[in-house]
Amino acid sequence: MKPSIAVTALLTLGLAQAASAQEAAAAPPAAAAPAPGATHPKAPLGRWITESGNLEVNIAPCNPAGGNALCGKVVRVLANRSMSAPGADMAAADARPALGMTLLSGLRPAEAGSSEYQGEIYNRENAKTYRVNLTPAEPEQLLVHAYVGIPLFGKTQVWRRPAVEQGSGQ
């Protein structure tokens, strides 16, 4: 009987996290709403600082010569903090240098007219690749939801634009 209680609690927690992430994505502040007739921002294009503050990632077309897939490459290393052990330095399972590493790949629009993108994200701390959904939350924020299997079993981070790029309209 106890395992079913634990499973129910886990599912409830997961549903609550998923619902709160969806609400955050669906309800940007009124000040962030685009003006009538304005085009939707090109999110997630441009530079983003990861939630841990470790890396600056540039999201751009994977192949500038053609194709609609986007990729995210590390353009600046800012710190080396662990995501799994807050306050500690990260011991990366992948020994390659972070600078120039592709962390996001195969990003494509989730559906026509949607601002959400789906693809894969690489975690160099454990050297694993996960599915990812990217959703603009506010003009200067991007919800990055990495998961295994189904989105319910995942974690959402908030990435922010670097200060010099805020308000650039990218």
Image (cartoon, rainbow, N blue to C red):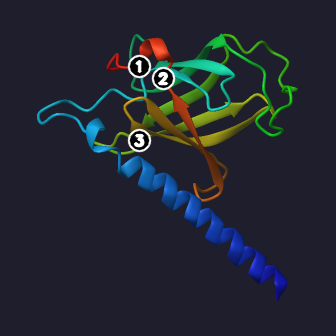
Establish if 58 lies above or below 31.
above
Amino acid type at image mark 2: Arg
Q: Nearer the viewer, residue 27 or 3?
A: 27
Residue type, label 3: Glu
Q: Answer whether labels 2 and 1 touch (C-beta < 8 Å).
A: yes
Q: Secondary structure at mark 3?
A: loop
Near-viewer residue (110 or 141) = 141
**Quarter containing the C terminus:** top left
Question: What is the spatial separation of the Cα atoms under label 3 and label 1, in whole angstroms?
Answer: 20 Å
Residue at the extreme left:
37
Asked if the residues shown at circle 2 and circle 3 are in contact, with their CB atoms under 8 angstroms apart, the answer is no
Q: Is residue 50 left or right of residue 83?
A: left
Q: Residues within 10 Å of mark 3 (few under 14, many from 20)?
A: many
- Residue at the spot 69% in from the left edge and 22% down from the top edge: 54
Residue linked to disc 2: 161
- Tell me which label, 2 or 3, sits earlier in the chain: 3
Tell which tag, 2 or 3, sits nearer the viewer. Answer: 2
